[in-house]
C-alpha cells in the first residue's frame, strides 16, 4: 500500500492506520478482504456490504515485538459493529489470550453497534468484553486508541475503558451515548449536539485526559502515538478485586467532588486550572503541561 | 441494490498465473466504493463483478468499466466492486488507484 501525505491518524483509513502504527510491512491480515467474510444481514436489507465488514484485524510487529492489531474503518457505516465485525474483534482477543502477544492495539473509530443488525451487534459487544478480559487475565496489555472522526461511542466506548490503557488525541472522543442521542432523548436544553465546543469539552480528548478516562494524550502524529504506545509495553494494569475497588472508590470521590458542576468548565475550575476557558484553544504541548499539573495520576 | 457482471477481453492467449497477492483500494461509504483485484484464470480476460446500492445505472457502469478494461488490458484478472453510490468520476479515480497498485504488486 502507498502511504503518501499522511501526518496523523485522523483522516486515514483503517488499513493506512495499521500500516502507520506498526513496523513497516510487518502486518499480516487475518480474514483479509478476498476471503469475503462480510455481513449476512446487510444484503437482506438491500445495503451495500464491505469485504472486511469494516474492520481489519491481524498480526504484526511493533518495535520488533509481536503484537495483535485491529482497526475499525471509519468510512464504512460509521465504523459500526455488526455481527461479523464484532466476531472478528472477539476472535482476535481470544487468540491473544492463547498466543500472548506483547500487546493488542485497538484503533477504534465508531458510533457503536450497527443498528441494522442491532441484536447481533449488542451480543458481539458482550462477547468482545469477555474476550478482552480473558486476554487481560493472561497478562496481555490491551491499548485502545481514539483518534478518529467518529469518536469512540456506544458499546465500544465501554470496551475502550475495559482496556488497560486508552490513548486519545484532541480530535478523539470517548463516551457511551453520542451527542445526537443525548439531545434526542433529553432535549436540546440538556445537550445541544450542534454546539461542537460543548461536545468536545464534554467528550473530547482534552477533557477525557483531564478526567483520566484516557491515560495518555498525544498530538495526532505517528511518531508521538508510537512513542506513547511503546511506553505501555510490559505494563499490564492488574485485573484484581483490589484494583476494581480502588477504581470504584476513585469514581465515587469524583462524583462527590464534581456533582454540582453543570459544565466541563466548572470541573476544570475545580481541578485548579486558572484559565479554564482557554483549555480548548491550547496547543497540545501547553495543554499537556497544564493537564499534568492538575491531573490525578493513577 | 443491483448486481452486474461484465467480461472484457481476452487480451492474451496466455493463461499462466503469476501468484499475485490480491489488493484492495477504497472504502464502501456514501459516494465511495471499494475495489478488490485478484488474479484468476479467465483465459486471458478481465471480469468485473459489481454490487451497487443505486439502481438504474447499468449502461453507465458498462461504459466506465469497458473504458478501463480496454485501457489497462489486465489479463486473468477479476475486479470485484462494492459500491456505495459513487459518481463515475470517483469510480474512475478508484479504478486508476487500483490499477496503479496492481501494477506495483509483484
Image (spheres, rainbow, N blue to C red):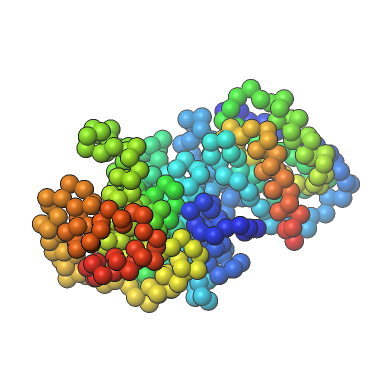
Taking the view exactly as shown, the residue that stands out farthest to the right is: B13
Rendering quarter of residue A178: top left
Q: Quadrant of the N terminus of chain A?
A: bottom right
**What quarter of the picture does the C terminus of chain A occupy?**
bottom left
Residue B63 placement: quadrant: top right
Residue at screen point 33% across, 49% down: A200
Q: Is residue B12 visible?
A: yes
**What's the residue at 53%, 53% (across, down)?**
A12
- Rendered position, B105 above or below A184: below
Left or right of B61 in this view: B8: right
How many marks the image carries: the answer is 0
Q: Position of A159 compared to B13: left or right?
A: left
Percent x, y for residue A100?
A: 41, 72
Q: Is residue A121 in sight in this rendering?
A: no
Residue A176, percent across and down? 29, 47
Residue A124 is situated, as x and y percent measured from the top left of the image, at 36, 48
Q: Relative to the observer, which residue lies in front, A196 or A82? A: A196
The location of residue A247, given as percent across then percent down, is: 19, 64
- Write the residue at 12% across / 58% down: A257
Observer-nearest of A24 and B106: A24
Left or right, A3 with respect to B96, comes to left
The residue lying toward the viewer, choosing from A210 and A281, is A281
Residue at (39% x, 49% y) in the render: A151
Amino acid at each position: 500500500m502507498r502511504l503518501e501525505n499522511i501526518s496523523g491518524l485522523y483522516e486515514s483509513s483503517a488499513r493506512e492506520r495499521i500500516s502507520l502504527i506498526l513496523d513497516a510491512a510487518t502486518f499480516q491480515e487475518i480474514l483479509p478482504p478476498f476471503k469475503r467474510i462480510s455481513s449476512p444481514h446487510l444484503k437482506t436489507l438491500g445495503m451495500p456490504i464491505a469485504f472486511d465488514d469494516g474492520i481489519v484485524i491481524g498480526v504484526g510487529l511493533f518495535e520488533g515485538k509481536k503484537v495483535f492489531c485491529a482497526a475499525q474503518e471509519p468510512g464504512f457505516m460509521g465504523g459500526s459493529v455488526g455481527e461479523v465485525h464484532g466476531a472478528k474483534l472477539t476472535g482476535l482477543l481470544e487468540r491473544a489470550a492463547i498466543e500472548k502477544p506483547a500487546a493488542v492495539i485497538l484503533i477504534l473509530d465508531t458510533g457503536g453497534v450497527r443498528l441494522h443488525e442491532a441484536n447481533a451487534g449488542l451480543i458481539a459487544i458482550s462477547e468482545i468484553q469477555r474476550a478482552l478480559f480473558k486476554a487481560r487475565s493472561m497478562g496481555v496489555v490491551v491499548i485502545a486508541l481514539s483518534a478518529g472522526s467518529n469518536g469512540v461511542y456506544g458499546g465500544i466506548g465501554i470496551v475502550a475503558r475495559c482496556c488497560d490503557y486508552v490513548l486519545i488525541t484532541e480530535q478523539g472522543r470517548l463516551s457511551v451515548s453520542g451527542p445526537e442521542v443525548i439531545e434526542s432523548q433529553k432535549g436540546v436544553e440538556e445537550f445541544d449536539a450542534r454546539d461542537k465546543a460543548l461536545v468536545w469539552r464534554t467528550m473530547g480528548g482534552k477533557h477525557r485526559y483531564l478526567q483520566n478516562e484516557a491515560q495518555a494524550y498525544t498530538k495526532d502524529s505517528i511518531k508521538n502515538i508510537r512513542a506513547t504506545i511503546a511506553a505501555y509495553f510490559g505494563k499490564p494494569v492488574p485485573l484484581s478485586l483490589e484494583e476494581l475497588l480502588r477504581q470504584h472508590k476513585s469514581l465515587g470521590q469524583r462524583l462527590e467532588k464534581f456533582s454540582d458542576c453543570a459544565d466541563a468548565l466548572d470541573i476544570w475550575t475545580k481541578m485548579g486550572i486558572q484559565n479554564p476557558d482557554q483549555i480548548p484553544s491550547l496547543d497540545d504541548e501547553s495543554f499537556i503541561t497544564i493537564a499534568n499539573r492538575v491531573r490525578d495520576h493513577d | 441494490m443491483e448486481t452486474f457482471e461484465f467480461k472484457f477481453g481476452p487480451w492474451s492467449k496466455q493463461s499462466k498465473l503469476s501468484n499475485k497477492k490480491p489488493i484492495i483500494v477504497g472504502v464502501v461509504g456514501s459516494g465511495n466504493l471499494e475495489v478488490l483485484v485478484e488474479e484468476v484464470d479467465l483465459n486471458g480476460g478481465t471480469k468485473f463483478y459489481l454490487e451497487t446500492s443505486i439502481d438504474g445505472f447499468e449502461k453507465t457502469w458498462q461504459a466506465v468499466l469497458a473504458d478501463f478494461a480496454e485501457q489497462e488490458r489486465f489479463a486473468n484478472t477479476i475486479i470485484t466492486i462494492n459500491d456505495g453510490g459513487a459518481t463515475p468520476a470517483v469510480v474512475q479515480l478508484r479504478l486508476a488507484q487500483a490499477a496503479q497498485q496492481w501494477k506495483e504488486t509483484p
